[in-house]
Image (tube, grey):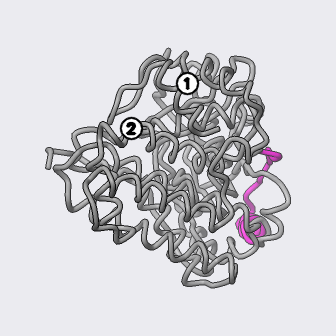
């Protein structure tokens, strides 16, 4: 295990009725105005919007809004919210929603305190020095944005989807009431679950063999997701399964899995998936259920051990060589994705064969990336071919 330091300052209010617990924090922060950021109908259907606005009204807190935040959130909405704040300042930002609302809120929180364009942070031309506090209310678990310091935003003008990171972006408070997720569409539960699994796998499959305690936790959490996703397809209002799903999402990408590892993980699959989301508006989780198995098939012969250990510890695959166990594990993962209704090929996403070259060109602008194996343009092309 490598030396490490770990920092996560987010206060989590977890469980039924947790929105009410925000009252003391809002009072103590002397909040007078809060900007609400959310997507659309789902926040009303879940009851989250009503609970939040009733509390704000009770406390006589004004709440201007920026809504219609899309999946794969766009820079134009970030800029719209920043302009609104600069015209009329707020004390806190309250995203109500999933990762898209939280990511947007994070970018806005830093951009509203910056004199130039917020995209500078994503191009690494500047770093945030100040940010407006975020008091978030989660309605869809997946990205772990409610407990981390990362914001992922798409910029169609530049044909690029990327992230910014700063400790200033950690939400001050995140309310996680699993009941708000009772009304999620089945597809969102499935795709969110794929994203959660991917966040864990990107640590387990990075080739680091020196952090067994974190690996063991990761294997356990993947087994949890393999259990709860089908349970939630069968019964979307199963509170215990929703709670397990939501808490696993938090653990998956709050930073703890990087503790003791030689690297933060291998996020190559996310980069491959980001291009699909950017260019073809593919749901994030669907892009990952396609990209991750293809990436694994491309790499496992050179690096069988992490895939073989996945097979042993998650899918009870013990027979054969490491190479044989590795491919069996990849096939078992694909089979699980199919069983829950997630796509595993680009054809299932209705992408044409011509998209392979376009996706490759988009990803190639990053340069070489990856941990288990450094991927160049030729590697990316072959992975997309496997994914097709």
Residue 275 magenta = no
Residue 62 magenta = yes
Q: Does 277 sit left or right of 130 as displayed? A: right
Quick one: SS at disc 2?
Answer: helix
Classify residue 140 by image quadrant.
bottom right
Mark 1 neighbour density, 10 Å: few (under 14) some (14–19) many (20 or more)? many
Mark drawn on residue 299: 2
Start-end of magenta stretch: 51-69
Q: Position of residue 344 (x, y in %)?
A: 62, 50
Quick one: SS at disc 1?
Answer: helix
* First reached walking from the N terminus: tag 1 or tag 2: 2
Identify the residue at horizontal 66%, vertical 41% (top origin).
Answer: 104
Identify the residue at horizontal 61%, vertical 17% (top origin).
Answer: 361
Residue 87 visible? The answer is no
Q: In the image shown, does 364 or 50 lie closer to the viewer?
A: 364
The number of numbered discs placed on residues in the rendered structure image is 2
Q: What residue did someone put label 1 on?
A: 381
118 vs 388: above or below: above
In whole angstroms, how far apart are the C-alphas of marks 1 and 2? 13 Å
Q: In the image shown, does 350 or 323 lie closer to the viewer?
A: 323
Classify residue 176 by image quadrant.
bottom right
């Amino acid at each position: 295990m490598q030396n490490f330091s770990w920092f996560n300052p987010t206060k989590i209010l977890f469980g039924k009725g947790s929105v009410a617990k925000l009252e003391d924090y809002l009072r103590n922060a002397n909040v007078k105005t809060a900007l609400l950021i959310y997507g659309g109908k789902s926040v009303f259907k879940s009851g989250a919007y009503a609970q939040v606005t009733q509390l704000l009204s009770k406390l006589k807190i004004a709440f201007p809004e920026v809504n219609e935040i899309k999946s794969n959130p766009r820079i134009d909405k970030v800029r719209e919210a920043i302009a609104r704040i600069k015209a009329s300042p707020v004390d806190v930002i309250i995203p109500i929603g999933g990762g898209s609302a939280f990511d947007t809120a994070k970018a806005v929180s830093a951009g509203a305190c910056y004199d130039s364009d917020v995209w500078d942070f994503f191009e690494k031309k500047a770093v945030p020095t100040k940010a407006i506090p975020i008091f978030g209310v989660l309605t869809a678990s997946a990205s772990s944005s409610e407990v981390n310091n990362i914001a992922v935003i798409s910029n169609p003008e530049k044909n690029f989807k990327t992230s910014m990171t700063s400790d200033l972006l950690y939400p001050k408070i995140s309310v996680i009431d699993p009941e708000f997720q009772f009304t999620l569409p089945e597809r969102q539960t499935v795709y969110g679950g794929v994203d959660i699994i991917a966040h864990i796998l990107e640590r387990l499959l990075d080739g680091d063999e020196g952090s067994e305690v974190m690996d063991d936790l990761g294997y356990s959490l993947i087994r949890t997701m393999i259990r709860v996703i089908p349970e939630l397809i069968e019964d979307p209002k199963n509170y215990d399964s929703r709670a397990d799903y939501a808490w696993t999402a938090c653990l998956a990408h709050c930073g703890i899995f990087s503790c003791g590892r030689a690297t933060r993980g291998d996020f190559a699959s996310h980069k491959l998936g980001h291009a699909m989301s950017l260019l073809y508006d593919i749901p994030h989780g669907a892009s990952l259920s396609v990209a991750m198995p293809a990436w694994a098939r491309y790499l496992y012969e050179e690096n069988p051990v992490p895939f073989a250990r996945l097979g042993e510890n998650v899918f009870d695959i013990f027979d054969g060589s490491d190479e044989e166990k590795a491919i069996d594990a990849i096939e078992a993962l694909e089979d699980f994705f199919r069983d829950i209704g997630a796509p595993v090929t680009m054809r299932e996403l209705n992408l044409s064969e011509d998209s392979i070259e376009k996706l490759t060109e988009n990803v190639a602008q990053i340069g070489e990336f990856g941990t288990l194996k450094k991927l160049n343009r030729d590697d990316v092309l072959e992975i997309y071919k496997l994914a097709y």
